[in-house]
């Protein structure tokens, strides 16, 4: 006749096996849920910045722009870039136009006060150029106003709506530094995320006047 210990052994083994099966099922459900989660329509809120990393006095080439759920790679041929100098000046080039300004460090990154820019028109449809123009514009100047038709047919100029009137020289664009290493820089501003790679020291940020871009691509 089996002793008391052997009578309890089989139920314990069965219980342990059931527990293992349940645990595996939970893990598989969690993996499936994580991998099949839909992509959001908007970027997540920016996390605390990496303001302690040094990103000034470097030439940062733009490599990708994310707006909403769409990320567009920016090829090197577009030549969009950003330079910030230790004296607080900033210069950006979106592949078509250059934008001057100043910046001040914050706890999350820095604020950009936009300044003058060149006025070259781009009539092409290259997705890299268009994304670079949009992303760098949001970074340097903030969201543009939405232009609507005049309320009457008098021929009056259109009016802006959908966004407040912002003076970029007094109302800065708040930039969050999401990542900053000696080679990579990721910024978030005005609902857009921009990724950069370092290609060398800053060379153009203190150049005056701002570059002549009359040979813009597709113009």
Image (spheres, rainbow, N blue to C red):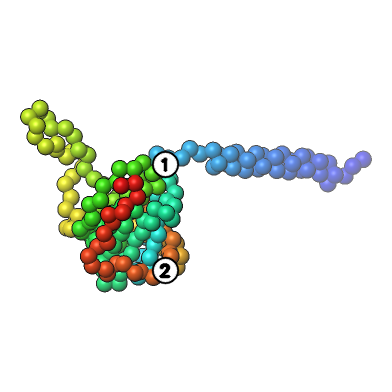
- For image coordinates 38% across by 44% down, the residue present is 126
In which quarter of the view is residue 9 placed? top right
Which numbered circle lies on residue 69? 1
- Residue nearest the observer in this picture, 97 or 179: 97
Location of residue 92 with respect to 53 vertically, above or below? above
- For image coordinates 30% across by 72% down, the residue present is 86
7 lies left or right of 204: right
- Frontmost of labels 1 and 2 is 2
In which quarter of the view is residue 41 placed? top left
State the image coordinates of residue 31 (x, y, percent, origin top left): 59, 42
88 lies left or right of 62: left
- For image coordinates 23% across by 67% down, the residue present is 208
52 lies left or right of 157: right
In which quarter of the view is residue 171 placed? bottom left
Residue extending farthest to the top is 153
Q: CA distance from mark 1 to mark 2?
A: 30 Å
State the image coordinates of residue 54 (x, y, percent, origin top left): 38, 69
Which numbered circle lies on residue 200? 2
Q: In the rendered image, is residue 106 in sight?
A: no
Which numbered circle lies on residue 18? none
Circle 1/circle 2 CB separation < 8 Å: no
């Amino acid at each position: 006749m089996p002793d008391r210990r052997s009578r309890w052994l089989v139920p314990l083994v069965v219980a342990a096996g059931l527990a293992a099966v349940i645990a595996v099922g939970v893990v598989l459900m969690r993996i499936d849920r994580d991998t099949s989660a839909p992509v959001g329509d908007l970027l997540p809120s920016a996390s605390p910045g990496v303001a302690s990393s040094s990103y000034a006095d470097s030439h940062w080439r733009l490599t990708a722009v994310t707006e909403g759920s769409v990320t567009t790679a920016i090829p090197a041929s577009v030549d969009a870039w950003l330079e910030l100098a230790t004296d607080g000046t900033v210069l950006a080039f979106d592949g078509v136009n250059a934008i001057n300004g100043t910046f001040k460090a914050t706890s999350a990154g820095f604020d950009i006060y936009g300044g003058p820019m060149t006025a070259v028109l781009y009539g092409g449809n290259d997705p890299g150029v268009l994304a670079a123009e949009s992303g760098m514009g949001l970074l340097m100047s903030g969201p543009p106003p939405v232009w609507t038709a005049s309320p009457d047919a008098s021929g009056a100029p259109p009016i802006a709506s959908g966004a407040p009137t912002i003076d970029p020289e007094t109302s800065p664009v708040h930039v969050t530094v999401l990542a900053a290493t000696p080679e990579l820089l990721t910024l978030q501003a005005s609902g857009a995320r921009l990724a950069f790679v370092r290609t060398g020291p800053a060379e153009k940020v203190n150049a005056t006047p701002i570059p002549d871009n009359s040979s813009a691509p597709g113009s």
